[in-house]
Amino acid sequence: MTLADFAMLLARYADGALGADVLAAHVGTVIASDALGAERGDDARWAADHESERLLWRLLYLFDAAMASPGDDAAHRARARRVVACLTSTQSPALTYELLPMVLDQDRFATIVARHVDGIISRTGFLSVIAESGYADHAKLWLQHAPPDALVQLCERLERGDYVAAAATLERAPGR
């Protein structure tokens, strides 16, 4: 299975055209067919496009865990929708991989930013959340120095699914 194949499966799942059981079966089959020993594995796909392979396997294990745990199917579908939107928007497996922790966490992140901007969460509390977030190091640095209006703008870009603009925001000095 390629990243493009899996993205199509995720899109079908997100739209409700594919059931959770079918997605879980596909994911399980791919994971089960992977040779666990490096000496038995075929590294040709990794050598040809390591960024796509890295994202593919991150997503396979992410959705394997999600499908294995009973939970809110609507939340899993929303997660799939965002992942597909990010990959479609960026057209870059590397950038999608980098943004993935924030994309998966964007609802919670937006709530935390809103509470921080409203003064409910202190700066110290906000910095603690950022430190433990799992976001890319440069994103953490940006978030630590961003003024409230820049944080709100980032959340708006994430909510609109404008992941290219969100990534570009994290590459510039906060507030610019």
Image: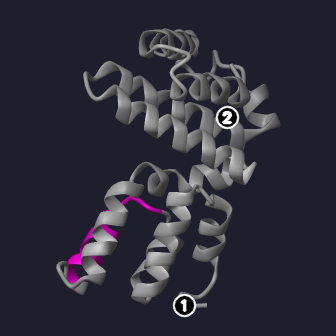
Check disc 1 and report the residue beneath it: 175
User: Which image quarter holds the C terminus?
Assistant: bottom right
What residue appears at the point 28 percent right and 68 percent down from the top-left corner? 112
Whole-angstrom CA distance, mark 1 to mark 2, is 35 Å
Check disc 2 and report the residue beneath it: 53
The image position of residue 125, as x and y in percent, is 20, 77
- Evaluate whether residue 165 shows in this view: yes
The image position of residue 106, as x and y in percent, is 41, 57
Q: Mark 1 is on which residue type? A: Gly
Sequence-first tag of 1 and 2 = 2
Q: Which residues are magenta?
A: 124-135
- Evaluate whether residue 146 shows in this view: no
What residue appears at the point 67 percent right and 25 percent down from the top-left corner? 8
The image position of residue 170, as x and y in percent, is 58, 74
| Disc 1 versus disc 2: nearer the observer | 1
The image position of residue 142, as x and y in percent, is 49, 80
What residue appears at the point 43 percent right and 89 percent down from the top-left corner? 147
Which label was assigned to residue 130?
none
Say few, some or many: other residues with alpha carbon within 10 Å of mark 1 (under 14 / 14 to 19 / 20 or more). some
Picture layout, residue 62 above or below residue 89: above
Picture layout, residue 120 above or below residue 161: below
Q: Mark 2 is on which residue type? A: Glu
| Residue 98: quadrant of the picture | bottom right
User: Which image quarter holds the N terminus?
Assistant: top right
